[in-house]
Amino acid sequence: IDVMSRNEIVTLNGTVGSAYEKQLAKAAAWVAGVDSVDASNLDIKPGAREEMMREQKFYTPSDEQIKQAVSQVFEMDPRIDKAEIDIAVNEATVNLSGEVDNLMAKRAAEEDAENTVGVTGVTNRIKVRPEEIVPNEKLEERVERALVRDPYVELFDINVRARNGKVILEGTVHTSFEKTHAENVASEIIGVVQVANMIDYKQKWLWQQDDDIKGAVKRQIFWDPYVDPDNIRVEVENGIVTLSGTVNNFREKVEAEENAFDAGAKDVMNKLRIKG
């Protein structure tokens, strides 16, 4: 696939093996700053698939290649100011340091590094130093207003306490997603340097037989384009899914766990190891 960019319009030329690959290529081209993507000249030739196939699905880049890749990702992520973050890579482990002015930027940097091919671990030593020191009461008010405006958690009674930039969230929600989402909402507020999420959730689980859950998990993993199912083992006991084996990167590990929850798991024990 050849990529050309002009006037914020990306044009893709070349050959892919299926309509789904064409769709993925077009989606991947939508990076920050792109106004439109033209994939009309991207031809689909199923017969060319084997000739185009890489010898290996994944490759192991060097530490320097990983560093360059992470740096490029940071340049494309509007949540991050690259100039404030230092990147060091040692044996596929990325070490981040420096300063940012908000907690979301710190989390975004860690997320971007984890999702970079070849990375097996991330150590995040980035410090959050807001340009504005917000008094405790004002910070609590900002977070409370953000939670009230948010459509996912507006109906829940979430208590907010702030102390020297650290925000503590307490209360009860229905699902683990809502608990995590509330934390993400708080982390986006200017002046927040740390979030302690003490929210409890009472998740309603629909009972299923272990064999049915196991089959559903395997199907979810099989059809996920980001997960290689060959080295993943699935066991289920009393609705709790245990994933073991090896994956190629951090994203694949997270995707497999999400697949298990989507398939009806009561809980997931993720024991997958990253190669490298």
Image (cartoon, rainbow, N blue to C red):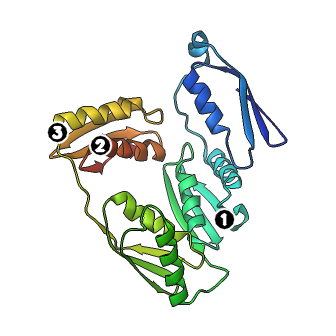
Residue 54 visible within the image: no
Q: Position of residue 147 (x, y in %)?
A: 47, 71
Identify which residue is drawn at 57% across, 46% down. 116
Amino acid type, callout 1: Ile
Q: Nearer the viewer, residue 215 or 181?
A: 181
Q: Which three-letter amino acid code belongs to the residue tagged 3? A: Asp
Q: Earlier in the sequence, mark 2 or mark 3?
A: 3
Q: CA distance from mark 1 to mark 3?
A: 46 Å
Cα–Cα gap, marks 2 and 3: 14 Å
**x and y percent of residue 197 in the render?**
39, 72
Could you tell me if the residues under marks 2 and 3 are in contact, i.e. CB atoms within 8 Å?
no
Of the two numbered discs 1 and 3 in the rendering, the one whose residue sits closer to the viewer: 3
Q: Image check: 257 left or right of 135?
A: left
Decide if residue 107 is on the left or right side of residue 29.
left
Q: Nearer the viewer, residue 256 or 85?
A: 256
Q: Secondary structure at mark 2?
A: strand
Q: Mark 3, residues whose alpha carbon is within 10 Å: few (<14), some, or many (≥20)?
A: some
Alpha carbon distance from label 2 to label 1: 34 Å
Mark 2, mark 3: which one is toward the viewer?
3
Q: Which is more N-terminal, label 3 or label 1?
A: 1
Q: Which residue is mark 3?
A: 210
- Going by the numbered disc 2, the residue's amino acid type is Leu
Callout 1 secondary element? strand
Q: Quadrant of the N terminus?
A: top right
The image quadrant of residue 54 is top right
- 10 Å crowding of disc 2: few (<14), some (14-19), many (20+): many
Residue beneath disc 1: 85
What residue is drawn where x is 29% and y is 43%? Answer: 243
Give left or right: position of 110 versus 176: right
Q: Which residue is mark 2?
A: 243
- Residue 179 in view: yes
